[in-house]
Amino acid sequence: MAATPVTESTSAYEPTGRTVPTRSRDRARYDRETVHSILDQAYVCHLGFVRDGAPVVLPTLFGRVGEALYIHGSTGSRPLLAAGKADPGLPVCVTVTHVDGLVLARSAFHHSLNYRSVVVQGTAYQVTDEAERRMALDALVDQVVPGRSADSRPANAKELAATAVIRLDLNEVSAKLRTGGPNDDAEDLDLPYWSGVVPVAPAYGTPVPAADLAPGIAAPGYLAAL
Amino acid sequence: MAATPVTESTSAYEPTGRTVPTRSRDRARYDRETVHSILDQAYVCHLGFVRDGAPVVLPTLFGRVGEALYIHGSTGSRPLLAAGKADPGLPVCVTVTHVDGLVLARSAFHHSLNYRSVVVQGTAYQVTDEAERRMALDALVDQVVPGRSADSRPANAKELAATAVIRLDLNEVSAKLRTGGPNDDAEDLDLPYWSGVVPVAPAYGTPVPAADLAPGIAAPGYLAAL
């Protein structure tokens, strides 16, 4: 048999019953380029899991490495303990959202947001391999500030022992996004209300040195790239 | 019996086994003032629910009115359908997060974020009362842009019929926050790495009028307050 050719489908995630939205299907995306781009511009995700039958959603940092997301926490944290103990792992949903604009329509009904989001569903497993754990911890730091892990003291044995790392592979993945202006109904276009988009984006302020920073250490250049 | 006096406890949410964190308990807050402030500066939440035993986390708009959060969606959306059909309602977790700063420590381990988050756990119910539904839809618009609901066309009967509204009462609620500079270990203070905080906040750009906006309609003053 010939080797499987690289086709367009390999650059997209396969939609599943859980990742095809019931509404606004035209806003759904499955290509890796879009998904990776949305993930890589973020460092905070919302991690969902089930505890005693009820949903729990917690904000936490993440790092993407290839087709995996890594999340870390104390070895005493509840979801990380659960991912380590449960067989077969911890069912999770990891969601990342960017707000790009407030969409003001003439009608209250058509108000909306411009946004980009990624939803990853699957099972998270504890990472036990030490090299992968170290790589993941670097990725978590570099997701927030690219280049920072190489410019800080790496974790020591005690810190590594206190840190749990879980991995969620990017298999069941969808992105959803809205762009553009308001979609007012034709009969509303002459109403006397302003209509348009207010752009929104995160803004980074001037770095504030630690009170006990030794003199002569300037803010590093990679902060300017934020 | 004397009437129950208004005590300090009435201005705070009662901690429960689900709202007391296992880690960093010093970062937890239960007072209504802190919780309301965090909620009122946001308009996007992450809504968690359980579908076929697995967690689902979706970003969505919310509005707070007193001690209730309202979320809306199409009558065809899966969680809103579930909240309407299920008895007794839909168990949910609604989480709101603000990132205020990137905390860069000398050690990779002590990297952190300054943030404020609120986690609300409970059961969401569909709102059927028409007056409450209209009030909730106004609140959802005003949560994004205060004052906007009065300056747009209210929902008509067809739009109201297509919109489901669910309510989650603020009973089981906790806030968590981190402020301040990095917490480096004493033995790391002389390491040659910059340490400090990079402030982060959402920035609103110049409003972009809709392409079909009638001439002579200026951007309203309430946009300047964003």
Image (cartoon, coloured by chain):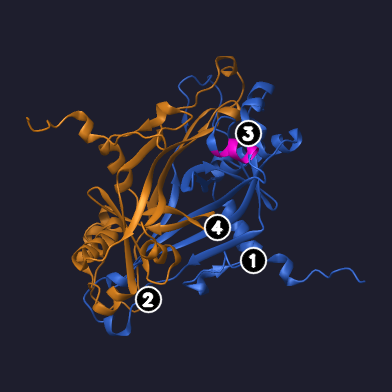
Chain colours: A orange, B blue
Q: Is residue B98 left or right of residue A63?
A: right
Q: Is the C-beta separation of discs 3 and 1 under 8 Å?
A: no
Residue at image location 6% in from the left, 30% down from the top: A2
- Report the Cα–Cα distance between label 2 and label 4: 25 Å
Q: Please identify the quadrant where the N terminus of chain B is shown.
A: bottom right
Label 4 sits on residue: B119
Is residue A98 placed above or below A189 in the rendered structure? below
Q: Is the C-beta separation of discs 2 and 4 under 8 Å?
A: no
Q: Residue furthest bottom?
A: B187
Label 1 sits on residue: B31
Q: Earlier in the sequence, mark 1 or mark 2?
A: 1
Instruction: Residue type at mark 2: give it.
Output: Asn
Q: Chain of mark 3?
A: B
Q: Residue A16 location in percent, x, y?
A: 37, 35
Label 2 sits on residue: B183
The residue range painted magenta reads: B79-85
Q: Earlier in the sequence, mark 2 or mark 3?
A: 3
Residue B147 visible, this orientation: no
Label 3 sits on residue: B164
